[in-house]
Structure formats: C-alpha cells, structure tokens
C-alpha cells in the first residue's frame, strides 16, 4: 500500500532572499544555526558545487564531490551526504535519486564545520524537467521499506507530470513535483519546498 508518511509542514512567508511565491517549511528537531550532531552510524559523503566527481568517493573532507547524485551513488546504507550551500542541478532534472536508507542534509558551509540552512541554503533546482528528489528503491520492497532522511534543503522548480516519476507510478500526474516518495517511509524535515508543478508540491506517494 502506498501512503504518505512523516511530513510536518507549516506555510510561512519567504525569507533569506529566496523570492518564492509560496513554499512549505517542514520543521522538526534542533535549533536553527546549530551544528549537526555526529552521525550515529555510517560514513559521511561531502558535496559542494566547487568539488569534483572524478575518481572521488566523496568521503574526504578536503576533497568533496560536485554533485549530490554522484555522492548518493558512492554511499552505502546508513551513510550521510552533507551538501554545502549553493545551487545543484541535473541535466535530467532529478537532482537526487535516493534508492536506499541514507541521510541527505543541506545547509553546510564550504568547510563543513557549521550547519544552518537559513543562512547557507542548499538549493536543488529541477529546472522544470522532473521531480527534484525521487525516493524509491530500485526494486519493490518485499519486507521493510527504505527510510531515508531529507533535511535542510531548498527544493524548487520540479515537474511532477514528467514521463518518469519513479517505479510503480501509473499516472505521471500523481507524482510529487518537489519530492516524489514511492514505496518508502522517509523523514522529510526542515526543508523549503517551493515553486514545483505536478500532482503535489511535496509528496506524490510515500
């Protein structure tokens, strides 16, 4: 069964110079501007727009990768992907295709020493092509669903009526333009989800 899960959303006016007409701010946990706690398990993969994907597993603090998708491809279950402030895009539109239980967290400074999504926005821009973030396993789950966390991001300009919205979607119009979650139980927290088009600004299915 497809359900929508674990999204706490409150509509608020825009801030931090992001001129969006409307957005959803999902808030849960820690105070703004505080450094994130060390991961309980798994490794950390670092990403910044000034980084490089070439022959890089993204695990070196001094040699971050350039794209979120590359870092997701290097990650193992339980890893954290820390994305520094800046704008991230993709030729296909989907900036982050999450297929396993990982944490994707934005709002980091370039040195990855301080986390504050409000003053250091990590912007995922779908360029009106496809959903910006797709959360879906590579195969339909037999047992427990994947449980990734997506936090501290600006998710914008997604298209939920594209040809591809993830495995199992019959009607593309049903897919979330900002975040499409299918056959998963994600935690979506402290994100700005704005100016997306499609079945839903945030979730299509969860």
Image (cartoon, grey):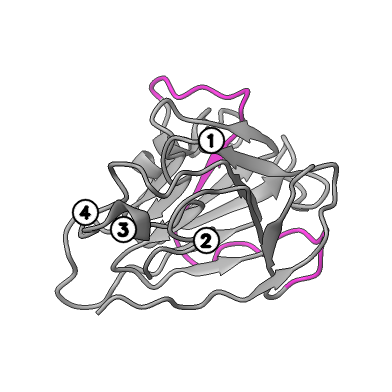
Residue at horizontal 85%, vertical 52%? Answer: 15
Residue highlighted by disc 2: 202
Task: Please rate how many residues cluster around mark 1, counting C-alpha atoms within 10 Å: few if below 14, some from 14 to 19, many from 20.
Answer: few
Q: Is residue 135 above or below residue 110?
A: below
The secondary element bearing badge 1 is classed as loop
**Cα separation between marks 4 and 2:** 21 Å
Residue at horizontal 51%, vertical 49%? Answer: 197
Task: Please rate how many residues cluster around mark 4, counting C-alpha atoms within 10 Å: few if below 14, some from 14 to 19, many from 20.
Answer: few
- Upstream in sequence: badge 3 or badge 2: 3
Residue at horizontal 71%, vertical 72%? Answer: 10
**Cα separation between marks 4 and 1:** 27 Å
Task: Pick the residue in front: 147 or 1.
Answer: 1
The secondary element bearing badge 4 is classed as loop
Residue highlighted by disc 1: 60
Residue at horizontal 46%, vertical 64%? Answer: 203
CB within 8 Å, label 4 to label 2: no
**Cα separation between marks 3 and 1:** 27 Å
- Upstream in sequence: badge 4 or badge 1: 1
Question: On the rendered image, what quadrant is the N terminus found in?
Answer: bottom left
Residue highlighted by disc 4: 138
Residue 85 sits in quarter: top right
Q: Is residue 49 left or right of 55 when viewed as pictured?
A: right
**Cα separation between marks 2 and 1:** 32 Å
Mark closer to the observer (4, 2): 2
Give x and y (percent) for residue 62: 61, 30
Residue highlighted by disc 3: 136
| Magenta residue span | 30-55
**Cα separation between marks 3 and 4:** 7 Å
CB within 8 Å, label 3 to label 4: yes
Mark closer to the observer (2, 1): 2
The secondary element bearing badge 2 is classed as loop
């Amino acid at each position: 069964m497809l359900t929508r899960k674990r999204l706490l959303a409150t509509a608020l006016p825009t801030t931090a110079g992001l001129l969006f007409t409307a957005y959803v701010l999902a808030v849960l946990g820690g105070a703004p501007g505080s450094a994130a706690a060390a991961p309980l398990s798994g490794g950390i993969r670092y990403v910044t727009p000034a980084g490089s994907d070439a022959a890089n597993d993204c695990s070196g603090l001094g040699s971050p990768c350039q794209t979120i998708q590359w870092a997701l491809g290097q990650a193992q279950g339980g890893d954290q992907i820390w994305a520094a402030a800046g704008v991230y895009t993709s030729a296909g539109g989907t900036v982050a295709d999450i297929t396993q239980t990982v944490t994707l967290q934005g709002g980091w400074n370039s040195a990855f020493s301080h986390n504050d999504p409000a003053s250091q926005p990590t912007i995922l821009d779908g360029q009106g092509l496809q959903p910006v973030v797709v959360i879906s396993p590579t195969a339909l789950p037999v047992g427990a669903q994947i449980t990734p966390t997506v936090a501290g991001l600006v998710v914008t300009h997604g298209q939920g009526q594209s040809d591809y919205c993830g495995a199992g979607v019959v009607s593309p119009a049903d897919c979330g333009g900002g975040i499409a979650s299918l056959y998963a139980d994600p935690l979506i927290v402290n994100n700005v989800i704005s100016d997306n088009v499609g079945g839903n600004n945030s979730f299509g299915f969860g």
